[in-house]
Image (tube, rainbow, N blue to C red):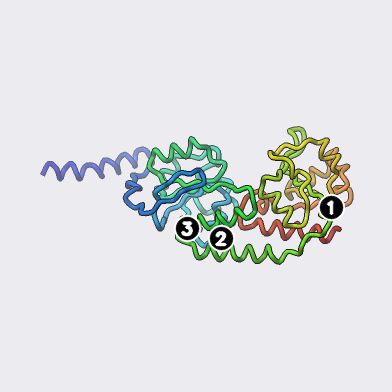
């Protein structure tokens, strides 16, 4: 009789504690995990074969999940997961570099998928709490997108949909006209002004987007993100690509306003989400930039 009382008291105590602290009582994740997955940091993680409560700690991951028909499995997303618009209805877990770990735990996820910007200490903290967290990081090539889509598809039981999405992206990319023999020079603006100039170097998928669109990245020899104003003025690229929301300020700020591409209207202002994140919309950026280059040559 005493054993039965103790057994009954444990879940009651858990529920009472949860009510007081505003957190949920977690079942052991290992009990439902029946497969293993090796993520991009070389960690082998036990994950459920068909997760039903997923938290995304990456805008790119969120886009991919919705693109393969798994958006309904999301119970948490970051403040920066703005696309597709339906993501706004999913509960927020805070920023990316400052994820609210307690909030994630309260959502009782059976899988968290993070990206490149999530600090390692946050990953370790969630691990210690028994939360399965898998890291799918940004790759340095455009083709790396396919691997990420396929990996996420396997994780959430949507492999067929992931394969179909990859096939569609490959088809669209293959229809883009071949580049001219003499590729025009292109500069992508990540940041500019008093804080310095930042762009995408040759070791980035953005460099591949420029190549696929028929251009040549003037920063292809750069391995980081910094680019000097002097080098930009000297190169005076044929085309400039910039986030739509930054274009007006860039065009009205010297010395950028003196660049030939600005003065001649060869500045392509595009939707930032199509190029800043490694997501299915990268092919939109390739198509948009390729059409812009063809129409302004």
Judging from the image, what secondary structure is the residue with disc 1 in?
loop
Relative to the observer, which residue lies in front, 174 or 157? 174
- Position of 119 with respect to 33 (left or right) is right
- Position of 71 with respect to 245 (left or right) is left
The reply to whether residue 92 is in sight is no
> What is the C-alpha distance between the residues marked 3 and 1?
42 Å
- Where, quadrant-wise, is the N terminus in this rendering? top left
Give the quadrant of residue 95: top right
Q: Residue at x 39, y 49 (%)?
A: 46
Q: Nearer the viewer, mark 2 or mark 3?
A: 3
Relative to the observer, which residue lies in front, 168 or 11? 168
- Position of 100 with respect to 142 (left or right) is left
- Where, quadrant-wise, is the C terminus in this rendering? bottom right
The residue carrying pointer 3 sits among few (fewer than 14), some (14 to 19) or many (20 or more) residues within 10 Å by Cα, namely some
Where residue 272 appears, as percent x and y from the top left, is 69, 50
Judging from the image, what secondary structure is the residue with disc 2 in?
helix
- Position of 82 with respect to 232 (left or right) is left
Confirm or deny contact between disc 3 and disc 1 (CB under 8 A): no
User: Mark 1 vs mark 2: which is more N-terminal?
Assistant: 2
Where residue 114 appears, as percent x and y from the top left, is 51, 46
Give the quadrant of residue 147: bottom right
- Residue behind mark 2: 67
Q: Residue at x 18, y 41 (%)?
A: 6
User: Mark 3 vs mark 1: which is more N-terminal?
Assistant: 3
- Residue behind mark 3: 154
> What is the C-alpha distance between the residues marked 1 and 2?
32 Å
- Residue behind mark 1: 266
Q: Residue at x 89, y 51 (%)?
A: 264
Q: Above or below — where is 62 with respect to 14?
A: below
């Amino acid at each position: 009789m005493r054993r039965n009382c103790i057994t009954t008291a444990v879940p009651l105590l858990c529920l009472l504690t949860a009510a007081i602290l505003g957190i949920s009582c977690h079942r052991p994740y290992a009990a439902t995990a029946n497969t293993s997955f090796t993520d991009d940091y070389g960690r082998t993680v036990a994950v459920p074969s068909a997760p039903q409560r997923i938290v995304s700690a990456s805008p790119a991951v969120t886009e991919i999940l919705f693109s393969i028909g798994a958006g309904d499995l999301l119970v948490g997303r970051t403040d920066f997961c703005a696309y597709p618009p339906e993501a706004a209805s999913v509960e927020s877990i805070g920023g990316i570099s400052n994820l609210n770990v307690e909030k994630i735990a309260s959502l009782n996820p059976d899988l968290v998928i993070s990206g490149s910007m999530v600090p390692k200490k946050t990953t370790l903290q969630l691990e210690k709490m028994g939360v399965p967290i898998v890291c799918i990081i940004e790759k340095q090539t455009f083709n790396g997108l396919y691997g990420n889509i396929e990996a996420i598809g396997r994780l959430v039981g949507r492999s067929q949909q992931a394969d179909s999405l990859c096939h569609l992206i490959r088809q669209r990319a293959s229809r883009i006209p071949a580049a001219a023999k003499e590729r025009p020079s292109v500069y992508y603006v990540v940041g500019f002004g008093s804080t310095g100039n930042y762009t995408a170097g040759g070791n980035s998928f953005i460099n591949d987007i420029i190549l696929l669109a028929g251009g040549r990245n003037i920063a292809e020899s750069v391995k980081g993100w910094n680019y000097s104003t002097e080098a930009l003025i000297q190169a005076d690229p044929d085309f400039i690509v910039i986030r739509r929301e930054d274009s007006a300020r860039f065009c009205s700020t010297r010395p950028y306003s003196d660049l030939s591409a600005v003065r001649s209207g060869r500045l392509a202002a595009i939707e930032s989400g199509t190029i800043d994140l490694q997501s299915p919309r990268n092919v939109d950026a390739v198509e948009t930039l390729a059409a812009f280059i063809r129409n302004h040559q």
